[in-house]
Image: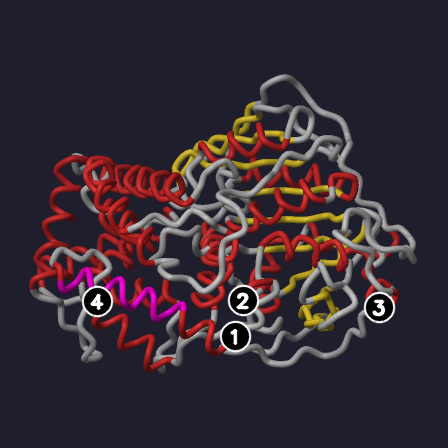
């Protein structure tokens, strides 16, 4: 588990599998169309808002759609899916220099006569592969697929788009088994910090020329070039989790090119790394409280029980049938995974019962492996690598070990379960990172942009509801349109029929809901 916004991909999967809920109230009355997303002829000039004019070799590209290759760790998409690649500048300050390829996947709109244009998706992470995930989740977006070409992409540095890998599977497994993510001795602290610094060195050694350019702002510039070569006058976009940070960054850089845009499970654009960690500590404890209440257990007593279990596991890891021990770090990762969606809460109950009753950790390990993108053969996806590289390229706020130690009492008060985990991550995540971060936090102000739907869920653990409020305000009056989902989990589309209907009405018919619309799950 990491402090950075994580598992947008899982959130999307969990949301789509959760089933629809009901209940919707609005604030000020119906809104009107304003986003727009009409298809326009490809422009011959550089896309609007780029840092420098792009050469015709880039702006004149036309994707060559072909049968898709099999993605790493996934199944070859069948049916009507086709794949292509678009060249983008490695360095937008030198747009005529070296290029990298951005992998795309597309399912064409089923109703060609009423086609609106392309709808691009980002499922979060950062580091989630849209090429792999969109076909898996596309049934949940079926109504949108009638009038949009559904388009997924691998952001730069991810999977098929020059995906970074910093360590091999054996090195990852060894660190997972030996490094305590909640160090409580000097020796554990030294090992934890050394591993963080070594990870950065490993990334630089294997991907050195790429790392400085794997920022969210550069991915937003890639999005605008992709929009251009796809032939869309405006970017129609659906971002989940980290995808909301990308969407907000795009809107800030290219406000005039914003089409119909939805941000679900929203990152607070005003928060630096410390504030994000504080938010997530609050969010995961809130979700744990809600889970415990659902079982009839007092939240305070239940939290103490879980914290006590983790302390026992720290002293004596849980054995499993696979021969791998579940450390307290893996146990806490598994607990966090189960809080991403209410549909996973029964799995958490079973995992905790197994650990407490039987003293074994198979179910906690299953959840932790799901979170860590480790398959049954011990192979890890590149998502964790990409996530870290992108996050550290973005963030210039890197607390020292001394600062983290000073924060520990506050974080422990917020959450006796997650406080140490998320505070210590601040010290280890970008420790001695080889590249300076771009900014303390992203910019999201987008004056003049079309209305953007900002969907926040009150029980979201990873991107707490307050982030949606901040994003809507930062985007600006008339741009950020807040939709509140009173419910649990990371992401609302697909789990709330009210949210799903509101989003569909906006994306398909341009109907902008009233700012302050509230849905009850």
User: Looking at this rendering, what residue extends furthest in the top direction?
Assistant: 28
N-term-proximal mark, 2 vs 3: 3
The Cα atoms of the two marked residues, 3 and 1, are separated by 27 Å
Q: Quadrant of residue 171?
A: bottom left
Q: Which residue is mark 1?
A: 207
N-term-proximal mark, 4 vs 2: 4
Q: Is the N terminus in the top left, top right, bottom left or bottom right quadrant?
A: bottom left
Dot 1, crowdedness within 10 Å: few (<14), some or many (≥20)?
some
The Cα atoms of the two marked residues, 1 and 4, are separated by 24 Å
Question: Does 51 sit left or right of 7 as displayed?
Answer: right
Taking the magenta stretch, the answer to whether it contains residue 196 is yes
N-term-proximal mark, 4 vs 3: 3
The Cα atoms of the two marked residues, 1 and 2, are separated by 6 Å
N-term-proximal mark, 3 vs 1: 3
Question: Does 184 sit left or right of 425 as displayed?
Answer: left
Discs 4/3, front: 4
Q: Which residue is mark 3?
A: 61
The Cα atoms of the two marked residues, 2 and 3, are separated by 25 Å
N-term-proximal mark, 1 vs 4: 4
Q: Quadrant of residue 260?
A: top right
**Residue at 77% across, 47% down:** 49
| Mark 1 vs 2: CB contact within 8 A | yes
**Residue at 18% across, 55% down:** 352
- Residue numbers of the magenta segment: 187-200
Discs 2/3, front: 2
Secondary structure, mark 3, is: loop
| Closer to us: 514 or 96 | 96
Residue 492 appears in the rendering: no
Mark number displayed over residue 211: 2
Q: How many marks are shown on the rendered structure?
A: 4
């Amino acid at each position: 588990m990491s402090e950075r916004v994580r598992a947008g991909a899982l959130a999307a999967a969990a949301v789509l599998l959760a089933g629809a809920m009901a209940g919707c109230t609005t604030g000020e009355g119906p809104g009107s169309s304003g986003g727009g997303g009409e298809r326009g002829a490809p422009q011959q000039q550089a896309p609007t808002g780029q840092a420098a004019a792009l050469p015709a070799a880039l702006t004149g590209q036309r994707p060559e759609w072909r049968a898709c290759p099999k993605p790493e760790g996934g199944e070859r998409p069948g049916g009507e899916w086709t794949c292509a690649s678009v060249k983008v500048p490695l360095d937008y300050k030198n747009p005529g220099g070296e290029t990298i390829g951005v992998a795309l996947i597309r399912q064409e709109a089923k109703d060609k006569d009423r086609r609106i244009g392309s709808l691009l998706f980002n499922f979060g992470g950062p580091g989630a592969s849209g090429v792999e995930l969109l076909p898996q989740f596309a049934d949940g977006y079926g109504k949108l697929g009638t009038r949009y070409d559904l388009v997924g992409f691998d952001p730069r540095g991810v999977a098929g788009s020059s995906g970074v890998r910093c360590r091999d599977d054996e090195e990852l497994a060894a660190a997972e088994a030996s490094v305590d993510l909640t160090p409580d001795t000097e020796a554990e602290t030294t090992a934890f910090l050394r591993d963080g610094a070594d990870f950065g060195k490993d990334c630089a050694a294997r991907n050195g020329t790429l790392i400085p350019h794997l920022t969210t702002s550069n991915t937003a510039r890639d999005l605008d070039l992709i929009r251009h070569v796809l032939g869309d006058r405006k970017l129609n976009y659906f971002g989940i989790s980290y995808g909301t940070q990308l969407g907000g960054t795009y809107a800030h850089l290219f406000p005039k090119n914003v089409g119909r845009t939805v941000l679900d499970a929203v990152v607070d654009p005003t928060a630096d790394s410390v504030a994000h960690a504080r938010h997530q500590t609050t969010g995961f404890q809130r979700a744990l409280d809600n889970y415990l209440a659902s079982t009839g257990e007092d939240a305070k007593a239940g939290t103490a029980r879980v914290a006590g279990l983790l302390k026992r596991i720290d002293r004596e890891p849980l054995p499993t049938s696979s021969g791998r021990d579940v450390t307290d770090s893996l146990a806490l990762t598994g607990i966090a995974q189960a809080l991403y969606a209410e549909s996973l809460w029964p799995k958490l109950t079973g995992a905790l019962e197994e650990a407490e009753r039987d003293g074994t950790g198979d179910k906690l390990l299953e959840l932790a492996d799901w979170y860590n993108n480790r398959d049954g053969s011990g192979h890890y996806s590149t998502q964790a690598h990409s996530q870290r590289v992108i996050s550290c390229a973005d963030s210039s706020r890197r607390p020292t070990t001394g600062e983290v130690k000073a924060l520990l009492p506050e974080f422990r008060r917020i959450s006796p379960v997650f406080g140490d985990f998320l505070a210590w991550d601040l010290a280890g995540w970008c420790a001695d990172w080889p590249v300076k971060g771009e900014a303390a936090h992203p910019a999201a102000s987008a004056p003049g942009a079309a209305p953007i739907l900002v969907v926040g869920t009150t029980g979201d653990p990873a991107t707490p509801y307050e982030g949606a409020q901040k994003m809507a305000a930062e985007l600006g009056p008339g741009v950020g349109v807040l939709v509140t989902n009173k419910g649990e989990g990371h992401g609302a589309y697909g789990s709330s029929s009210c949210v799903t209907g509101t989003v569909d009405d906006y994306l398909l018919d341009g109907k902008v809901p009233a700012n302050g619309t509230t849905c009850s799950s």
